Amino acid sequence: MPLPRGSDDGDLPETHLPAFAVLRDASRHTSEYDDFRCARTLPGARGTSMPDDLSGLKDDMNAFILGHGLSRFQGYVTEEVHSVMWDPRDNPESWKDFVELAKNAGAQFLSMDEEVLQRDELDYLIQRLQHTAFPSDDDMEEARWLRNYLGKTGFIQLGWPHQGIMFLFEATTEWYERYQHLLDMVEDFGSMAIDDTDQDDER
């Protein structure tokens, strides 16, 4: 569902863009883009240590956003939306600059989304792994290892709109990256199984 557009109070100062942003073209659905998305260009991906639970970071973000007089819109910005990804440059506090830039650009709100690992979601992943044609012992062990992170926040996305583009900041944990990798893998296996069934029906 498309997000509401923010106010258009003038052009965003061009001096901010090269230093802080990496342009992401939403039309790129290649494996190269998938690899880029997996890395997320986030503090954790750049070598900055991230905690295993981002719930404290989320609380800090909420307080900072409200303290700047901005509202929050609960929602996730998908890859189909044209967006620019914030580059933290190894600075774990750069999300504050991101929020301040939103205010300076005239944004009225920031979108926010977080992912908490739920037991039923992890059970679903383990079930799917067990029913793949060639389940890997390592993958199964890794999926069970993820039980250590049940109830923890592994991903946060902030965003604000300007002239038809969403400016995004994302933070993720290493364990959530592994969870997403396993989930994508079982979805790929499912797609392969459906394709094989369709080919058999045609024969």
Image (spheres, rainbow, N blue to C red):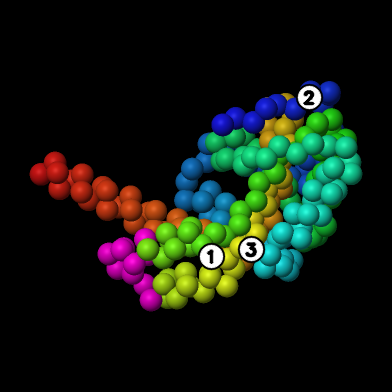
Which residue shows up at 62% across the image and 42% down it?
76
Q: Which residue is mark 3?
A: 152
Residue 23 horizontal side relative to residue 130, left or right: right
**How would you rate the neighbour count of disc 3 (Cα within 10 Å): few for under 14, some for 14-19, many for 20 or more?**
some
Amino acid type indicated by mark 3: Lys
Residue type at numbered disc 2 = Ser
Q: Secondary structure at mark 1?
A: helix
User: Dividing the picture into quarters, in which one does residue 22 lie?
Assistant: top right
Q: Which residue is mark 2?
A: 7
Mark closer to the observer (1, 3): 3
Judge whether 124 appears above or below 161 on screen. below
**Which residue is tagged 1?**
178
Q: Position of residue 21 (x, y in %)?
A: 74, 45
Q: Amino acid at mark 1?
A: Arg
Gap between marks 2 and 3, in whole Å?
Answer: 34 Å
Tell me if I can see residue 159 in this picture: yes
Please say whether residue 70 is one of the residues in the magenta stretch.
no
* Residue 58 screen position, x and y as percent: 75, 54
Tell me the SS state at disc 3. loop
Residue at 61% across, 63% down: 151
